[in-house]
Amino acid sequence: MNPNSRTLRNLAWFAVAFALLVIVFGAFVRLSNAGLSCPDWPTCYGKLTWPKHDHEIEAANAAFPERAVESHKAWREQVHRFLAGGLILTTFGMTFLAWRRRRDLPAIVPVLVAASVLIVFQALLGMWTVTWKLKPIVVMAHLVGGLSTFSLLAYVALRLTLPAQGRADTGALRRMAIAGIALVALQIALGGWTSANYAALSCGMDFPTCAGRWWPATDFREAFVLWRGIGVNYEGGVLDADARTAIQLTHRIGALVVLGHLLGVILAAWRRGFRRDALAVGIVLAAQIALGISNVMLGLPLPVATAHNAGAAVLLLVLFALLVRLRRDVA
C-alpha cells in the first residue's frame, strides 16, 4: 500500500470512530431530554457556547422567556453540534483527498461524495430538530441519517482495509448480507420512531409480554401518522397510550424479523468459511438484543439506552465488513 492510500485509510478509520462518537453523544443528548435545551440554532441562547454564569443565564432567560436555561443540559446540545461540525470537516477532507486520486479509487470517490452531501443534509435535520420542536419524523430521520453517514464512512474504511474474498458460491450469501443491512436499517428507523414518540416504556417494564398481555389495546392508525404540521412541541410526546403501545409492539416484531434473518446470515457465513465475520455478527447481535430487553426491564436507564444506539452502529459495521469481504476481485 502506498503512503497516500495508507493516509486515506487511517483517516477513514478516524472518521468512522468520530462518527460513532457523534452518534453516541447525540443519543445521550436525546435520551437525557436535552434536545431542546438550546432553543436557537446554531447558537445556544445567542451564544457560541452556552450560558454558564449567573449574568449570562439571566440575560438568556430574558431573551428567550419561553425556555428557561438549564445549563446542565445546554452544554450537551452545543457540544454535540461542535462534534458534528468536526465530523463534517473530516468528511469533506477525506472527499477532497480521494477526489485527487479518483482514477485510482473509482469505487471510493462516489461513496465519499454521497457522504459529504448526506452530512450537509444531516446538519439541516439537526436545525429542524430544534426549530420544529422535536418533530418525530425529523428526529427519526436525523438518527437514520447519522447512521447512514456512519455506514458510508465505514464502507470506505473497510474497502481500503479488507481483501476481496468472494467466490462463485458466495453470491447468495452476499444477497443475504445486503438484505440483512436493509432490515437492520428499517429496524433502526422503527427504533428512532419509538424514541421520538416516547414509546420505549409504553408496555411498562414488561417483557416479553406488554403490560401483562401478549396483545394489549393498540392504535396503529394513529401511531404511524408521519406528518402532523409544524408548531407543536413534541417534547414528552403527543400520542395516547394505545398508539405508543402499537409503536413498541411494531419495534419488537421488527426485532424478531431481524433476528431470524441474521441467524440465517450467520449460519450461511459460517458454512462458507467466513467464520470470524459470522462470530462478529453473532456477538454484536446478541449484545444488541440484550440491551434492547434491558432497556424495557430496567426502565430505560440512560447508559443502557445510549449503548443500544451504539450497538446499532456496530451491528451495521460488522455486516458491512462481511459484505465488503464477499466482493469479487475484478483486478
Image (cartoon, grey):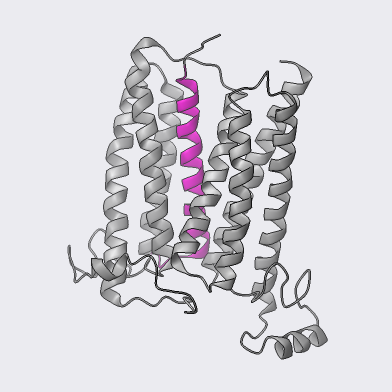
Whole-percent x and y of residue 213? 18, 67
Residue 308 part of the magenta segment? yes
Q: Taken as a whole, is the magenta stretch helix, strand or loop?
A: helix
Q: Which residue is drawn at 71% across and 36% down?
A: 94
Q: How many marks?
A: 0
Residue 218 relative to residue 102: left or right = left
Compare residues 166 and 111 and report the one nearer the observer. Answer: 111
Q: In which quarter of the image is the C terminus?
A: top right
The correct choice, above or below, for 257 with respect to 267 in the image is below
Whole-percent x and y of residue 4? 77, 22
| Residue segment shown in magenta | 298-327
Q: Residue at x 59, y 74 (%)?
A: 36
Residue 314 appears in the rendering:
yes
Residue 323 relative to residue 117: left or right = left
Residue 108 part of the magenta segment? no
Residue 20 appears in the rendering:
no
Q: Quadrant of the N terminus?
A: top right
Dividing the picture into quadrants, the one containing residue 49 is: bottom right
Dividing the picture into quadrants, the one containing residue 84 is: bottom right
